Image (cartoon, rainbow, N blue to C red):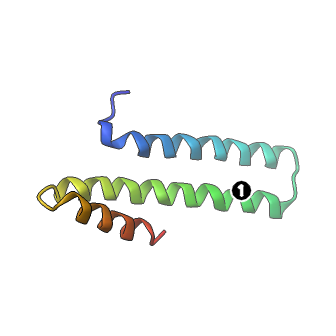
C-alpha cells in the first residue's frame, strides 16, 4: 500500500464502507424492504463519518507530536467519541 502507515486504518475503514455500499446496491436491486435498505445505508454513512474523523484525528496527531502520547490518545478518543 502506498499510503502512509498512519493512514492504513482510514483506508481499511473506507474499504469496508465500500463493501457495505455494494451491499446496499444489491439490496436495492433485489427489491429489499426500504427500512432494511435505509438501515444499511445509515451504517455506510456512519462508517464514512468515522473514516473522516479518523483522517482528521491522524492529522491532529501529527500536529500534536510534542504532547505526551497519553494526552494525544485521550484527545483522540474524545474527538472520535463525537461520532
Q: Position of residue 21 (x, y in %)?
A: 65, 46
Q: Nearer the viewer, residue 6 or 34?
A: 6
In the picture, residue 38 is in which quadrant?
Answer: bottom right
Q: Nearer the viewer, residue 8 or 29?
A: 8
Q: Name the quadrant of the N terminus.
A: top left
Q: Position of residue 17 (x, y in %)?
A: 58, 47
Query: Is residue 39 rendered to the left or right of residue 11?
Result: right
User: Which residue is tagged 1?
Assistant: 40
Q: Position of residue 27 (x, y in %)?
A: 80, 47
SS category of the residue bearing label 1: helix
Q: Position of residue 14 (x, y in %)?
A: 50, 45
Considering every residue shown, the one lying at the far left of the view is 66
Tell me the residue at 68%/57% (across/down).
Answer: 41
Q: Is residue 55 above or below residue 14?
A: below
Tell me the residue at 20%/52% (across/down).
Answer: 62
Query: Is residue 48 rendered to the left or right of residue 67?
Result: right
Marker count (numbered): 1
Amino acid at each position: 500500500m502506498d499510503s502512509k502507515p498512519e493512514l492504513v486504518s482510514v483506508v481499511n475503514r473506507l474499504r469496508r464502507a465500500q463493501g457495505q455500499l455494494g451491499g446496499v446496491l444489491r439490496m436495492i436491486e433485489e427489491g429489499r424492504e426500504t427500512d432494511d435498505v435505509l438501515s444499511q445505508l445509515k451504517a455506510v454513512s456512519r462508517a464514512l463519518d468515522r473514516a473522516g474523523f479518523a483522517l482528521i484525528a491522524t492529522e491532529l496527531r501529527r500536529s500534536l507530536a510534542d504532547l505526551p502520547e497519553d494526552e494525544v490518545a485521550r484527545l483522540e478518543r474524545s474527538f472520535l467519541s463525537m461520532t
